[in-house]
Amino acid sequence: MQLTKGFEQAACIMALLATQNRGIPLSSHVIHTRVSSSQTYLKKIMRKLVVGGLITSASGNSGGFSLAREPEDITLLQIVSAVEGKIHTYPNNGLLDLVFSDFKPIATEGNSAINAAFDAADQLWRQELDKVTIYDLLCQTLGTVDVPKVDWNKLQLSPSEQATAIVEKIRTNLRSGR
Amino acid sequence: MQLTKGFEQAACIMALLATQNRGIPLSSHVIHTRVSSSQTYLKKIMRKLVVGGLITSASGNSGGFSLAREPEDITLLQIVSAVEGKIHTYPNNGLLDLVFSDFKPIATEGNSAINAAFDAADQLWRQELDKVTIYDLLCQTLGTVDVPKVDWNKLQLSPSEQATAIVEKIRTNLRSGR
């Protein structure tokens, strides 16, 4: 039982947008190049994030995507809900009703009981993910509360040692209090 | 995000076995007739329940399946774990590492942070399901703490009004204190 790969992609898109310079939309080309998934599938994911009110899209030459609100105000649960809808972990295909079809009222109550048990567990799962914001994750990741912003549109994707070295330097500076 | 249909089948098998007369194994034929799934698939599920220590199988003419312990000692989490293994809801395919491959150490820490957040939620989910036993569910379903036992081997599966009426009568008796 896992969230879809689409959720993992959404998490990456949100990470890009949360570190993107405010006021400069991130081009869908850059998102596509970095996330390297089918363009149709990525469009679906981004559409879901737009509909879920987590990101906004601007059209035109310098168009692209931006966070709809601050990383402090976006939780993991909100991303999960936007991409996957409401979570029900018990696969309720009515099998209990079928297996005990000769004891219908009991089967129906059994079905309610097992669904209620899973609903309670699902609710705890959701509550926990609703406590964690993108900002929390960025702070943990970078080891600082000053999350630096970049313009991903201008950064070439390359696995160069140089880029890693630069970022390590930024982090060291941030950690030492700047 | 849902558990597999196999889990729903396992829940039905456990419900049959928990209400089966002790000492009389339930034949795989009856399980197959009631759950009406592919025999190969059902065998896999039952094998998982045996390996998970939740049911036992006896061979021979009057062979079949029995609960390995009392319904009071079997939790929903134990059934989930037997059928699905340990649950990790975050689909960790390493996409964050790929998307931010030019910032490797940061990507790896980001991956750890998001995994830790989901692990915490998954743990709460598991803990909640570990509190609910099959016995709890049967009591809720039947509205009584005296769970009646039957020999499912001898009951014909038929959606007859009669069977429903008989069971309703049993429940009414049980509820009124017997």
Image (spheres, coloured by chain):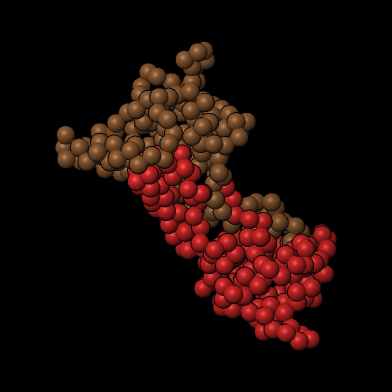
Chain colours: A red, B brown
Question: Considering only vertical position in the picture, is B26 above or below B127?
Answer: above
> In terms of image quadrants, where is residue B166?
top left
Rendered-image quadrant of the C terminus of chain B: top left
Question: Considering only vertical position in the picture, is B173 above or below A33?
Answer: above
Asked if residue A149 lies left or right of residue B113, the reply is: right
Identify the residue at horizontal 75%, vertical 74% (top origin).
A28
Residue A21 visible in the shown view: no
Residue B173 visible in the shown view: yes
Identify the residue at horizontal 42%, vertical 53% (top origin).
A119
Asked if residue A65 lies left or right of residue A53, the reply is: right
* Percent x, y of residue B104: 73, 57
Identify the residue at horizontal 70%, vertical 53% (top origin).
B94
Label count reads 0
Between A100 and B101, the residue placed more toward the observer is A100
Furthest-left residue in this view: B177
Furthest-bottom residue in this view: A60
Between A141 and B121, the residue placed more toward the observer is B121
* Percent x, y of residue A125: 46, 55
Identify the residue at horizontal 48%, vertical 28% (top origin).
B30
Between A11 and B113, the residue placed more toward the observer is A11
* Percent x, y of residue A128: 46, 58
Asked if residue B145 lies left or right of residue B81, the reply is: left
Between B31 and B110, the residue placed more toward the observer is B31
